Image (cartoon, rainbow, N blue to C red):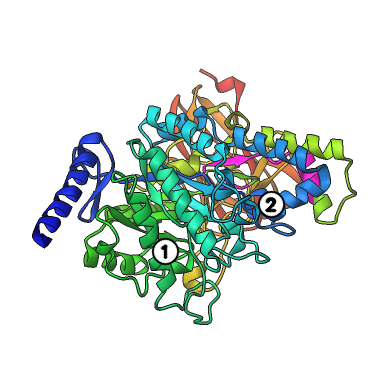
Amino acid sequence: MKNIFLFLTALFFLSGCNNRENAGFLHTNGKKIVDATGNEVILRGMGFGGWMLQEGYMLQTSAFAGPQHEIKNTIAELIGPESTEEFYQAWRNNYCTREDVDEMASWGFNSIRLPMHYNLFTLPIEEEPVIGKDTWLDTGFDMIDELLEWCAANEVYLILDLHAAPGGQGKDANISDYDKTKPSLWESKENQRKTIALWQKLAERYADEPWIGGYDLINEPNWDFDNAGNKNGCNCTENVLLWDFYKRAIDAVREVDQNHIVIIEGNCWGNNYKGVPNVNSFDDNLVLSFHKYWNFNIQEEIQYILDMREKYNVPIWLGESGENSNTWFTNAINLVESHGIGWAWWPFKKIGSVTGTITIPKTEGYNNLLQYWRGNAPKPDVGQAKEWLMEQAEMMKLENCMIHYDVIDAMFRQAQGDKSPIPFKEHNIPGTVFAADYDLGANGYAYLDTDTANYRVSTQKHTGWNNGHSYRNDGVDIERCNDKPGNGFSVGWTEKGEWLNYTIHSNTTGNYVIELRYNGAGSVLLQIDDKKLTPTKLPCSADWKSVKLGETELEKGTYRVKIIIDDGGVNLNCLKFKINDKTIY
């Protein structure tokens, strides 16, 4: 009887694997994630941080409200609960639309990691009418259904990620909306039961959906399970409660869904896998996730997870990374893809930040609210405050946002090895070329800057890159500028030896006079293709002024123009290419 049982069990799992392949589901094959035809799939994804779950830094509220419940309470105290719900509904409606998914697919992304807040799917345990039973809410499920429809139309995989589990899964409260006045996920068996019930409900609903890429069971657990002295679990060596929870959650998923990949993360924000049992005993369709931020992009930094892949013969996935410079993005993606590892970047949209693919413009009204909440402005009336919040929610729509093509270029073209300069914008002369519109490309190819990324985890020292935090995400330091003519930005914090490259097109053959619009002081050298003009000393000026750099004969055609900082301290607005009428042909 025992042999028959083992035979039937093996047949059952083999049948499940074959069904996955035949039906088109992503699944694991040794160390690889593959599609239905057995071809390896490198997941290139974006995390929708801020949509279902807000974090204070994404809304610039960290100084007074970090976790979402604090943000929501702050808003509700000002405009009331009903208007707060209207704001959140507008936020959810506008953050992601079909247009967003269409655009992402056109840029090259083949997956989306969806960070979910449990409270869009079920009530907190404190609000359940009957303890031990679950009230299911339509909001979260409807959001997934609609997003999945858009993903399927674009052949983009949707990975469900429980970012905020009932009670919260870590002491880093902003990430999981943890409220320390209530029992956490790990302190409450009822929260654990509800979390597992939620995963079973999700798996049952999406069991037959091939464009669901997998189930990321718990985002970045960070808890001192072993009482080892680090509140975020980085010193833990056993992590027994975590591994036991994963086994129970996977068992619940497999009762209703034999098709989809399940993904687990270690303690200490996803990376502490100490004490993990043989992961092959967890499931036969399992992926190990790790997260990577602010460290060096060298193999030594990911060797521990490479060793786990080798030891257990399972795929690994960089489930979250980002919040750095374009240089860091290029090198990190190149590193992991060179080892056959897919990735999901973080986050898709943020208010007023250049470090992601999309910046949500910050409205004047929303800035007024931030100043009030920080104690720097008078309290607005309820109607005005609500209007300002709804205006900011309207800015979430892609049509109102700024797409950072420099970030996208760094994550795809440059990460695949092509770091050469290509035009950021079309520059035709005679005309004006703004300094901040230098070419797309890597440091040393399209520009040269001394500070290019933040490696604080490896160096224990924060290092910036774009000191002005504006417009682009390279090492070039760009700040806002009101000078005219202008595009709203200027290049500053210049240092000796730095340079900027521009691809320009001369529409007219003639003798061009070249002027630089600047303030500050320093010295610059202009190079056109291989021809260098005489260095120009720039007298100190507090105001923006124009100075002639030289003149040169140019025929019709395309040229590489380089501004070289010969002596730092000068701020650059634009180059003006004028032509002497007497020499026009």
Image height of 213 relative to 187, above or below: above
Determine whether, in the image, residue 289 is placed left or right of residue 195: left
Which image quarter holds the N terminus?
bottom left
Magenta extent: 353-370
Residue 432, picture quadrant? top right
Can I make out residue 585 in this image?
A: yes
Q: Residue at x 10, y 56 (%)?
A: 4
Q: Is residue 556 magenta?
A: no
Element under label 1?
Answer: helix
- Which amino acid lies under the numbered mark 1 shown in the image of this protein? Phe
Of tags 2 and 1, the one toward the viewer is 1
Q: Nearer the viewer, residue 294 or 474?
A: 294
Image height of 232 relative to 156, above or below: below
C-alpha gap between disc 2 and disc 1: 34 Å
Residue 203, picture quadrant? top left
Disc number placed over residue 306 in the picture, else none:
none
Q: Is residue 360 magenta?
A: yes
Residue denoted by label 2:
60
Element under label 2?
Answer: loop
Q: Residues within 10 Å of mark 2 (few under 14, many from 20)?
A: some
Can I make out residue 486 in this image?
A: no
User: Which residue is at the far top?
Assistant: 585
Q: Position of residue 74 (x, y in %)?
A: 77, 51
Residue denoted by label 1:
245
Q: Nearer the viewer, residue 155 or 240?
A: 240
Determine whether, in the image, residue 62 is placed left or right of residue 77: left
Q: Nearer the viewer, residue 433 or 161?
A: 161
Determine whether, in the image, residue 302 is placed left or right of residue 373: left
Q: Who comes first in sequence, dot 2 or dot 1?
A: 2
Q: Position of residue 551 (x, y in %)?
A: 56, 36
Residue 288, picture quadrant? bottom left
- Which amino acid lies under the numbered mark 2 shown in the image of this protein? Gln
